[in-house]
Image (cartoon, grey):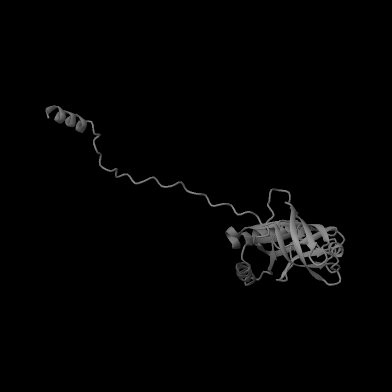
Amino acid sequence: MAIMGLALGIWGCSHPPTHPPSSRPPAAPPESKPETPRPVRVQEGVASWYGPGFHGNPTSSGETYDMFQMTAAHRTLPLGTRVLVTNLENHRTVEVTVNDRGPFVKDRVIDLSYSAARVLGMVGPGTTKVRLEILGDPPGGQVADFSAKPFYSLQLGAFSDLARAHTLKKELESLVGPLGVRITQVQMGTQELYRVRVGRFEDREQAMARANELAGRGYVVLVVPD
């Protein structure tokens, strides 16, 4: 019995001591970064075309519109984006470069030059259902994405005299503050024009509200796609 008691005593002494539970809170799981949405590179909708009435006018890129070149207008794609356009009614295709803003009819996705529309066989009908596929991003590192929202600016003047553009810019800077004023140069035929623009708005209604404020001060203001 003495030997058994001693053995039990030794076994009891060898049992590890218990510790009170830790009051430290459990470590928070590592934060998961939200996934960057992939750019949308395909779009379907209705295409239209524009020709003689606009031939020779400046485009949003500053280039002169030439109805015989393979170009197009799009509301949001960065200027310089190359796009493959497929006519879904006859499956003809054409490659164009975006150099202008438009179309401004709600249910249309692209305005094509006369020559591009002719390749697609849509000059007569005027409109057709198309698929747009981005072939290449423009120079400068911008990523072309059909899901991007359009931007708007306020244009308060266009001058052939750069000094007059700078005078208006200086006058406006004290009125618009952080919105900012900039001068953009475009070529209109053989003449250079300097456009004075204010701000960059994601929302057209917001742009219209600021345009009305400036119009109330006596300025002539256009809300234009940027």
Residue 112 appears in which quarter of the rendering? bottom right
Q: Horizontal and vertical percent for residue 164?
A: 73, 60
On screen, residue 45 versus residue 121, left or right, reads left
Q: What is the x, y in percent for residue 129? A: 77, 68
The part of the image, by quadrant, that contains residue 118 is: bottom right
- Quadrant of image for the C terminus: bottom right
Q: Residue furthest left?
A: 2
Q: Residue at x 78, y 60 (%)?
A: 85
**Count of numbered marks:** 0
In the rendered image, the residue lying farthest to the top is 3
Question: Does any portion of residue 181 appear in the rendered image?
Answer: yes
Name of the residue lying farthest toward the front: 1
Residue at image point 74% right, 57% down: 133
Q: Is residue 204 above or below residue 69?
A: below
Q: Which quadrant of the figure contains the N terminus? A: top left
The percent coordinates of residue 165 (x first, y second) are 72, 59
- Residue 13 vs 26, above or below: the answer is above
Q: Is residue 193 visible?
A: no
- Determine the residue positioned at 66% across, 63% down: 152
Q: With 60 as the anchor, is 70 left or right in this view?
A: right
In the depicted structure, whether residue 164 falls above or below residue 31: below
Decide: is 104 above or below 179.
below
Judging depth in this view, the residue of 143 and 190 nearest the camera is 143
- Using the image as rendered, state which of residue 9 and residue 118 is in the foreground: 9
Q: Would you identify the image quadrant in which residue 119 lies?
A: bottom right
Viewer-side residue, 187 vs 132: 132
Indicate the position of residue 88 as horizontal and vertical percent values.
Answer: 78, 65
